[in-house]
Amino acid sequence: MRVVAVLGILGSGACSSLSSPIVGQLATEPSPKEERISSLEASLADALIEIEKMKARAPSVDGSDILPAIPPDAETGRCYAKLMAPPVYVDRIERRLVKEASERKELIPAELEWVDEKVLVSEAHVRLTVVPATYKWQEERTLVLPPRSTQVLVSPARYDVVIEEVIETPEEWVWQVGRGDIEKIDEESGEIVHQVRIPARYRQIKKQVLVEPAKYRKTTEPGVYETLRKKVVDVPEHTIEERVPAKYKTVKTQRVRQAEREVTHQVAPVYKDYAYREKVSDARLAWRMVPCEREMSKELGYKVQRALRKLDYDTGGLDGVFGKHTLAAIHDFQKKKGLATGRLSSETLSALGITDE
């Protein structure tokens, strides 16, 4: 199985860290030039690692689910391997209808009672008597020709011509190539541009302004009236009302106190909850952090075997060797815990309570 190691610089995939200085050489103070070269090399290595991480996180062109060449968000100095991640299930509860809602109808008979009831013999009515109108003579002053008003021009209006400036193009700020107070990098050309203020442009227009309005004199001619004599109503025709009350008598009658009715009783539906597991994703290859080759020591083997034996897994002995029995016990433990299978991983060590220091 291929194991990928992420180091301070991109190498051939080995699991070792950067080598230490050779024993026996004299330690000399680095020159400024060597320090500058070392700093640039470190920055370049970080940039290359970030590029590879971005490629790993980017979706494939055809939209297929292809495992990236290196693990996304990989940590420097760690080793990773492609392991078979188990399918993912979620526990769900579905409520199913066992018996639908129904109705139960009940017929309740009417209730009767005897009561005294007033019965109308003759309705109340109004007797009307008409009184004719009376008249009288009356003089009235009537307007024959209404008053009339006229306006006479005394002096015309006076105007002046004034010159006024109006904005033709407003003030604006534009980006031009070069340096200035406000700068940015143009995203298309990559050049440095700065903001330049272009002042507003004005033009002059002539406008006529009222200086003094026109003056008028108003004259009014009085109206013409005429006196007329006419006959008018003194007391209009009217009606005198005389109200006659209604007449009743009391009789015994049987009436329905409460009518026959049908009562509907609602019977609630019956439900039952069913528990089931739903698969949300199939088994798939996935990157997992694993112990590097330098960390697969006998001491780690002892720790793994002791932890598995405490959980009643058969490791074939306690020898610190990752033999077939130990690997089979690791595989069984991973399947039971829902962990990725294929080899010993860091998440398996964590599940066993072992820190891969």
Image: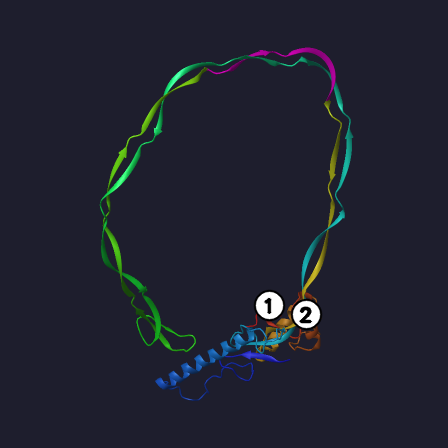
**Figure quadrant of the C terminus:** bottom right
Please identify the quarter of the rendering in which residue 151 is found: top left
Residue 102, percent from left and from top: 76, 41
In-front residue for pair 8/43: 43
Q: At x 69% / y 72%, what residue is drawn? A: 331
Which SS class for mark 1? helix
Between 250 and 11, the one nearer to me in the picture: 250
Task: Tell me: 120 left or right of 55.
Answer: right
Which region of the structure is painted magenta? 235-256
Q: Is residue 30 above or below residue 234?
A: below
Q: Amino acid at mark 2?
A: Ala
**Residue picked out by circle 2:** 283
Q: Residues within 10 Å of mark 2 (few under 14, many from 20)?
A: few
Sequence order check, earlier mark of 2 and 1: 2
Q: Nearer the viewer, mark 2 or mark 1?
A: 2
In the picture shown, does residue 243 fall above or below 327? above
Q: Which mark is residue 211?
A: none
